Amino acid sequence: MTPVILKYTKRSVRKAGDHLANKDTELDDYFTAFDILDNWRASHAYPMQSMLGYFRNKAFDADPKAIVARRLKRTPSILAKLKRESGMKLDRMEDIGGVRIVVDSLTKVHAISESIKNGRTRNILRRERDYINFPKDSGYRGVHLIYRYNGSKEGFPCHNIELQIRTEIQHAWATTVEVVGTFTRQGLKASKGSDQWLDFFRLAGDVFATIEKGVPKTENNKDRDRLIKKANQLGVLEKLQAYAVTIRYMNDKPRKGDRYFMMILNASSGGIRIGRFPSLERASAAYAKREKELRDSDDEDVVLVSTESIKTLKLAYPNYFADTSQFRQHLRKLMANKSQQTNR
């Protein structure tokens, strides 16, 4: 590929980020800043690609079945992060270029992390974040390594690439957070939104982590019971299944002009009704009407989602597109074990 080289100074990149984060920025300044952002983002592709082979080789040495993927951070996500996180500067953002490794055990996560850190590479390890031993408040777990490009090609003076290493369970958790956030229109990934959902995922992260570490079930009973209770209160399994059906419907049955989909889930029967709309105006009107009708109903839930949001999920999770099946499998297993103990 022909590398996109950074055309601006680090100072210009930072100034552009400040303009983009400021809602009062003049229109001309905003468009100029957007052009700088576009070049800054695109210029991460070559450093990311140059590191990919090294990361992939180390991953496959530990696990030939490892999943290795890369992505440039989407522009809307960059803008949201600039506005959401106080003090965030565009030139310091470390995850514009990202590589993700997914393996089937904690042992392999740590082995790959150590192998990469101790291996021979010209690139510089800038930072390590161990979210397994020190998980985020949200319940997120994984190991993040931040490398700065230090290769021979000029034009990439301050480009950081973030490597995420996760187990399959940790990735299933993160994927499910993303899916629920998309369908409920909440920033759950950034710990924003309903306390009920945030508490559920925080607890799920804790319980799944104890399972992975082999903690005896008797030491995990209290948290497990709380998790099951919250899952039942939120109707988690029913909603995740409905989201999966909706995603398949949106992809398998496209109809020209349909961009918005309203899903009505009946928790008791498990039935799903899906309405299709060509415009946001018509979709919003139908959604508002149905939401008003179901305001006092504990049995039905209504969700409005667009094809753009599903596309976002595809870009964020190309290998496990919106697949919550593994998360659901673990949750069902916990519920089945609880039911068996209760019936003894």
Image (spheres, rainbow, N blue to C red):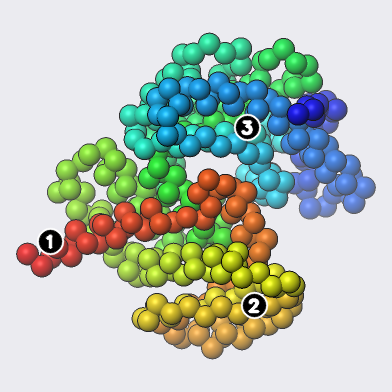
Is residue 36 placed above or below 200 in the rendered structure? above
Dot 1, crowdedness within 10 Å: few (<14), some or many (≥20)?
A: few
Mark 1–mark 2 Cα distance, whole angstroms, equals 44 Å
Q: Nearer the viewer, mark 1 or mark 2?
A: 2
Which type of secondary structure does the marked residue at label 2 adopt?
Answer: strand
Mark 1, residue position: 341
Report if the CB atoms under discs 1 and 2 are less than 8 Å apart: no
Q: Is residue 340 left or right of residue 42?
A: left
Check the image and name the residue furthest to the left.
Answer: 344
Mark sitting earlier along the chain (1/2)? 2
- Numbered circle sitting on residue 94: 3
Mark 2 → mark 3, Cα distance in angstroms: 39 Å
Mark 2, residue position: 276
Residue at point 67% right, 39% down?
72
Q: Label 3 amino acid?
A: Glu
Q: Which is in the foreground here, disc 2 or disc 3?
A: 2
Q: Is residue 192 above or below residue 43?
A: below
Quadrant housing residue 94: top right
**Above or below, comparing residue 48 to residue 259 in the picture:** above
Q: 210 or 254, which is in the foreground? A: 254
**Image quarter (top left, top right, bottom left or bottom right) of the C terminus:** bottom left
